[in-house]
Amino acid sequence: MFLYNLTLQRATGISHAIHGNFSGTKLQEIVVSRGKILELLRPDANTGKVHTLLTMEVFGVIRSLMAFRLTGGTKDYVVIGSDSGRIVILEYHPSKNMFEKIHQETFGKSGCRRIVPGQFLAVDPKGRALMIGAIEKQKLVYILNRDAAARLTISSPLEAHKANTLVYHVVGVDVGFENPMFACLEMDYEEADNDPTGEAAANTQQTLTFYELDLGLNHVVRKYSEALEEHGNFLITVPGGSDGPSGVLICSENYITYKNFGDQPDIRCPIPRRRNDLDDPERGMIFVCSATHKTKSMFFFLAQTEQGDIFKVTLETDEEMVTEIRMKYFDTIPVSTAMCVLKTGFLLVATEFGNHYLYQIAHLGDDDDEPEFSSAMPLEEGDTFFFQPRPLKNLVLVDEQENLSPIMSCQIADLANEDTPQLYVACGRGPRSTLRVLRHGLEVSEMAVSELPGNPNAVWTVRRHVEDEFDAYIIVSFVNATLVLSIGETVEEVTDSGFLGTTPTLSCSLLGEDALVQVYPDGIRHIRADKRVNEWKTPGKKTIVRCAVNQRQVVIALTGGELVYFEMDPSGQLNEYTERKEMSADVVCMSLANVPPGEQRSRFLAVGLVDNTVRIISLDPSDCLQPLSMQALPAQPESLCIVEMGGVEKQDELGEKGTIGFLYLNIGLQNGVLLRTVLDPVTGDLSDTRTRYLGSRPVKLFRVRMQAQDAVLAMSSRSWLSYSYQSRFHLTPLSYETLEYASGFASEQCPEGIVAISTNTLRILALEKLGAIFNQVAFPLQYTPRKFVIHPETNNLILIETDHNAYTEATKAQRKQQMAEEMVEAAGEDERELAAEMAAAFLNENLPEAIFGAPKAGSGQWASLVRMINPIQGNTLDLVQLEQNEDNADLNSLPLEFLHKTPVEDVPLAIAPFQGRVLVGVGKLLRIYDLGKKKLLRKCENKHVPNLVTGIHTIGQRVIVSDVQESLFWVRYRRNENQLIIFADDTYPRWVTTACLLDYDTMAAADKFGNICIVRLPPNTSDDVDEDPTGNKALWDRGLLNGASQKAEVIINYHIGETVLSLQKTTLIPGGSESLVYTTLSGGIGILVPFTSHEDHDFFQHLEIHMRSEFPPLCGRDHLSFRSYYFPVKNVIDGDLCEQFNSMDPHKQKSVSEELDRTPPEVSKKLEDIRTRYAF
C-alpha cells in the first residue's frame, strides 16, 4: 500500500509573529509562523482586512523568528531558528512573491536538542549582530554586515558558551552604536547537580547576564551578571541610544523590574490585580506577552498578563536615569502568544486559542480616568494595586482570522443533507471553545438584496468612462424589457441612460473611452457620451441569437449561424467588417477576451456550436474570420469565457504595470462539466484540458475581478469561483444559494464585488476570504470539548466538556455571593451602605469569559457538562451540568436522562459498545460491563494491558485496544469461556492519541509526537489462541519480546509534524474515493490517499526525489529526515512538497519536468488530478 499526503487546511495556530518592512516599501507586513509554516500577512490600512501574501511550508519546526534591518537600510530580513541545526536568513521578493534564502550557516546537529542552538534568537536593535542560543550551554553570535555590492554578509560564529547553564530568554539590548550587547536570563545548576542533599537546588537563583560583542577584538565577553530575587520569565528591551534610557525590563512573578548597569538603581513595580477576583488570591501573576511601540518622540510597552489584561507601561526618566515605571490598565483581550503594534495604529493579536484578532488602537489611554500605578507609590512588600476590568475602550476590533487550534475532536458526516459531507470540529479551550461546522466553500458576505418587479434573465454592470474606478450602471434584462439602475449612495432606476428599455438585452459593455453599446435581438445600439445614438438593425427576418463584446469589438451571430464582426475605428465609430462568416451549425455561445493593454483588438473569438465543438476564429485583419483551431467536446457547450490568469506582475518599458499570464478558454457544458484549456496566444491552438464536474445544471461562465486579477465565476446547481491565488489555481464553490446570472461589480463600499440574480432578487455579494478552503460556522461552548458522538436517530451531537482548574456555574455563583457578603462585613458602620452598593454591583457584573477568561479554581477542581446540540442551527437542546469535581471522560449516546452512576477504582479513559454490552478501559484494565438496574455489572476483565487503556475499537469478536505508550493490542473475546485474550501486538512503542479501524486486519494510529502509522496483522495471524491458566506450558510458547506471541507489521510510517487528535476513514466529495482524514492540535486538516496505479506512484516518487534536491526546504531542514523524525518514512509520498512545484521558477520547473519526461503543464495537471479525485 502506498499513500499520498495532502494538506487541506494548513495549521491555523500562530506560535510567533514579527513585523517589519519585508517588501522594502513603506508598508509594514507581518510574518507569522504556524509550527512548520511561514506566512506573510499584510493588513490593509483602508479596509482593516488582513491579506495573506504568501504561505510556505518549511518542513521543519520553527522555534524562533526575528526581523532585523541593517543600519541605514529600508528592508527587513527574517532570521529563523529551527530544528535544522542551521541559522537561516530570508529575504522577501515582492516581484516573485517568494522568500529567498540568502544565508544558511550550519552550526550543529538537527533536531530539537538541549544544547544545539535555535530555541532563542536575539538581534541587536541596530542590526549589527544576532545571537542564537540553545536551552542549555551553547550561544553563538554572528556579525552582520554588507559587502561592496550592498549584499548582506554574515561572519563566522563567535562562541559565548557556558556549561551547566539553562537559558530562559535572550534579548538584544539597545545601546545605540556602542558595542552590541545581549541580555540573558540564565540559571547555573552546577552546584545543585553536585549536592545530594537538595539544599543547593532550593537556593539556586536566576541570574541576569549581559554579553558584550567587542567589534574591535571580534569576540564575545560576559560583561556583567547579577542574581535576581524573583524568578523572571521574559525580558523586554528598552529603547536606547538617542531614543531612550536603554536597559531591560524583567517580567517576573508579581513584579516587573527595570535594570541597567552603571549606577542605575533597580526600579520595581508590582503587577496590578483585578479587584474582587474569583481566582485564588495566593496565585502569582505573570506577564506572558508584550509589544513595544516607538516613535521619534516617545515609546511605550503593552504587556499582557495571563488573565488577558493589557497594561500600558511607560518609563519616567531624569537625565538618562530611570526614576519610575508607570503602568495603566489599557484593555482586556484574550491571552495571546504574540502581539505586534504597527505604525498604522493596528494591533495584531495572535491568540493562544480561538480566533486571532486585528484591533485598531483608537486611543492611547492618556486622558481617561483610569488610575495610573507607579513604582514610586508606597506599598507594603507583597501588596499590589487593584483595577477594575471593563469592556474595550482604547481598542476597536477590525478583523478576525479564524483559528481552529486546538482541534480536540472531529467527525465527518453529511448531517445537513447537502451531498458534500461537513466536518464537525470541536475546538478551543475553556470558555473560548467552539463547535465549528466546516463546509468546503468560500464565505460570501451579502452587501445588499433587493426585489425586482419580475424574474430577470441577465444582469451586467458598465462604467461611464474607461478611467472610472467604479461602475455607473447596473443593467437588468427581463423577457420583454430592460431596466437600468444607476449606482450611487443607493441604487435607483434611471430612464435617460440611452438604453432601449422596451426590449430584452443580450449584452452590453463600455465601448472605447466613453461610449456604451447595447446588443438586443433586433440590432445593436451604440450610445455616445453626448447621448447621440447610432443603431444597426438586423437584415430581414433574422435576429441576433448570440453575441460577444469587449472594449473595442462586437461580434454577433444571426439565426442560421451567420457571424457579423464589428470593430471600433479611431473616431469611435463601429464599423462592420466587409465579409460575414457562415458557420456549419447553429451558434450556442461565444466569447471574446479583453483587449490586451497597448493593443487595438483581441485576436481570438471562441465560438461554441450545436455539433459539440468549440472553434477558435481569428480577428486579425490579415486573416479575419478564418478558423484557427477547434476542439470536440463530450457534450453541447453552454457558455465560453476567455480569460487571462495566473499572471506575475511585470512593468513594461514605460513603467506601466500589467500582468503577464496565460490565456485560458473556460468551457461550460450542458451536462454540468467545466473544462479549462490553455489558448496559445500566437497560433490559437488549444492544449492541456482540465475537467471538473460542478453540478447538475448547465454551466454558465462570467468574468469577474478578484484581487486585481481576472477570475471566472461558474454557475451550475452551485456557484464556483475559479481563480489564481499564490501561484496555484483554485476552483472553490461559494457557500451560498443557487445563482442564475452574474457580473463583476465595483463601487466605493465594495471595490471587488459581484452582482447576481437569483429568482426575482438582485444581490450584491463580496468574497473576502480568498484562499480559504472551508467556511466556518461557530457555536460557542462553555468548557473544553473532549469528545462527541452523533446521535444516529436525530443527527444531533452529544458533547462532553470538561475543564480542570475551573468552577461550575453553581460554585461560581456561590463564591461570588460569599465574596459580596465578606465585602459588606468588612466595612465599618458608616460605610455599610456604600459597601452594600458595591457588593450589589459586583454581583450584577457579568464580564464574558470568552474575553476575560474563566477564574482559576485551583488544582484538583473539575467542572464538566454533557450537552446535546443541533449541529445545523447550533441551538443547545439539552444541557446536564455535572457537580464540581464530577468528571466525565468519555461517552456514548443516550437521550439525556440520568440513570445511575457506577464508581470504579481508576479513571475510565475509553468506552465502546460491544455485542449489546459495553467495554470500558478502567486504568489499565479492560472490562466488559452489562447494564443493571442500579449500576453497571462487571462481567469479564483482562489485566494484561501494560499502562493505561486510551482507546477501544471493536470489529466482530475482535477488540483493538490502544495503550498510552505501548501502541496497539489485538484482543479476542471468547464467548464460551468468557475470556478476553490478547493475541497480537505491535513491536514499536507508540504514544497513541487516536486510532481508526481501516479493515478487519488493519489499524491506523497517530501518536502524540506527530506520527501516523498503519499497522496490519500478517495474513497467517490466528486469533484462536488459548490463555494458559495452569502455567505448565513450555516457556518457549509463551510469547515474543515479552508480549503476545504474534506481531503486527508496520506498513506505513509518516511524520506529520503536528500532534494528530482525530483520524477517520471517509469520502470528502460526492462520488470521490475514500481517504484517511486527520486533524491536528494546531488546527490543520489533512488527508492520506491511496494511489490507484503503480504508474502514478512511480511518477510522484520521482517528482518528490527531484523536488527534494531542486527546492530544498526554507529553514535548512532535510525533507527526508523531517518526515522520518521518529520512524523512517515508509510508503508515503509528501504531496505538500510535490505541490511546491507550482511555485518554483519556470526554468526549474522545466528542468524537473524534463527529468520526468513530461512538460510543466502535465506535471501540474497530475498534481491537480490527484487532489480533485479525493478532495478539493
Image (spheres, helix red, strand yellow):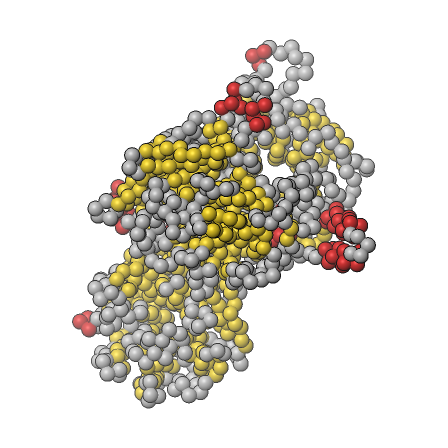
Image height check: is 378 above or below 530?
A: above
Closer to the camera in the image, 1053 or 841: 841
Closer to the camera in the image, 601 or 1059: 1059
Residue 780's x, y, as percent? 62, 53
Residue 932's x, y, as percent? 79, 36
Question: Position of 308 compared to 543: left or right?
Answer: right
Residue at the image point whose x is 71% and y is 37% from the top: 916
Q: Is residue 900 visible?
A: yes
Question: Position of 172 compared to 956: left or right?
Answer: left
Residue 883's x, y, as percent? 75, 43
Closer to the camera in the image, 4 or 608: 4
Closer to the camera in the image, 80 or 190: 190
Q: Quadrant of residue 700?
A: bottom left
Question: Position of 1164 compared to 866: left or right?
Answer: left
Residue at the image point whose x is 63% and y is 46% from the top: 379
Image height check: is 947 above or below 774?
A: above
Image height check: is 464 above or below 326?
A: below
Residue 598's x, y, as percent? 24, 70
Q: Is residue 402 visible?
A: no
